[in-house]
Image (cartoon, rainbow, N blue to C red):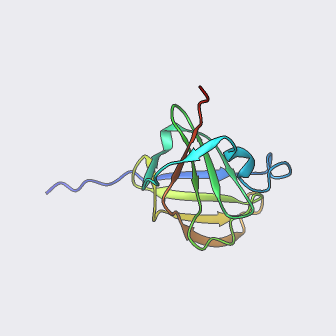
C-alpha cells in the first residue's frame, strides 16, 4: 500500500512594522472598497503583501483579484509589531488553520489562534 505524505507549507510573515505608524487599523486600506461574501480559503501563491493591525486583523493584498481581510478567532496576541507562522498541507490559507504568533527578533512565542473566513474587498469602480 502506498501512503502519500502531504507537503507542509510554512509561511513566516513579519508583518505590519512598516505600516503600523500610519494605519493603526485597516479602515484606510478598505476605504473605497466593498465587502463581498466571506470565503473559506485564499491562495497563498496570489498573496503579494500582508499587513497586520493592532486590532488583530490581517489584510492580504492579492494579485489579480479582490484583497482579503481576516479577523482570526480570539487572537488578542496578534499585533502589528509581531510576526506569525502558519502550517498548511496545501497552497491555500483556510479558516481553521492555526497561526503561531511570536516576536520576530527574539522568537518568543505569544500563543496561537485560528483563521476565520476571509472577507474579500473589491475596489468600487466609478462610472
Q: Position of residue 5 (x, y in %)?
A: 31, 54
Question: Which of 47/117 is in front?
Answer: 117
**Furthest residue in direction right, as rendered:** 21
Q: Quadrant of the N terminus?
A: bottom left
Image-based side of 67 in relation to 102, left or right? left
Query: Residue farthest to the front?
Result: 127
Name the residue rendered at 49%, 39% in the picture. Answer: 45
Please determine whether, in this image, residue 70 is positioned above or below residue 100: above
The residue nearer to you, when weighing 75 against 106, is 75
Identify whether 56 is placed above or below 34. below
On screen, residue 49 above or below 3: above
Q: Determine the residue positioned at 46% across, 47% down.
A: 42
Q: Name the spot of residue 27 as percent of width and height, x first.
A: 72, 51
**Along the line of sight, the residue nearer the viewer: 85 or 58:** 58
* Tally of numbered discs: 0
How far from the left and from the top, in percent, is residue 74?
60, 74
Looking at this rendering, what residue extends furthest in the left direction? 1
Question: In percent of the image, x 80 and y 45: which residue is there?
Answer: 18
- Residue 4: x and y in percent read 26, 53
Amino acid at each position: 500500500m502506498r501512503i502519500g505524505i502531504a507537503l507542509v507549507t510554512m509561511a513566516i510573515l513579519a508583518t505590519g512594522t512598516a505600516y503600523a505608524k500610519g494605519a493603526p487599523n485597516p479602515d484606510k486600506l478598505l476605504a473605497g472598497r466593498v465587502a463581498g461574501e466571506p470565503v473559506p480559503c485564499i491562495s497563498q501563491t496570489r498573496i503579494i503583501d500582508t499587513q497586520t493591525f493592532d486590532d488583530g486583523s490581517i489584510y492580504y493584498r492579492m494579485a489579480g483579484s479582490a484583497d482579503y481581510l481576516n479577523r482570526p478567532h480570539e487572537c488578542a496576541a496578534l499585533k502589528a509589531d509581531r510576526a506569525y507562522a502558519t502550517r498548511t498541507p496545501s497552497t491555500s490559507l483556510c479558516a481553521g488553520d492555526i497561526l503561531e504568533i511570536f516576536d520576530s527578533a527574539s522568537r518568543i512565542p505569544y500563543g496561537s489562534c485560528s483563521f476565520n473566513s476571509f472577507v474579500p474587498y473589491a475596489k468600487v469602480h466609478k462610472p
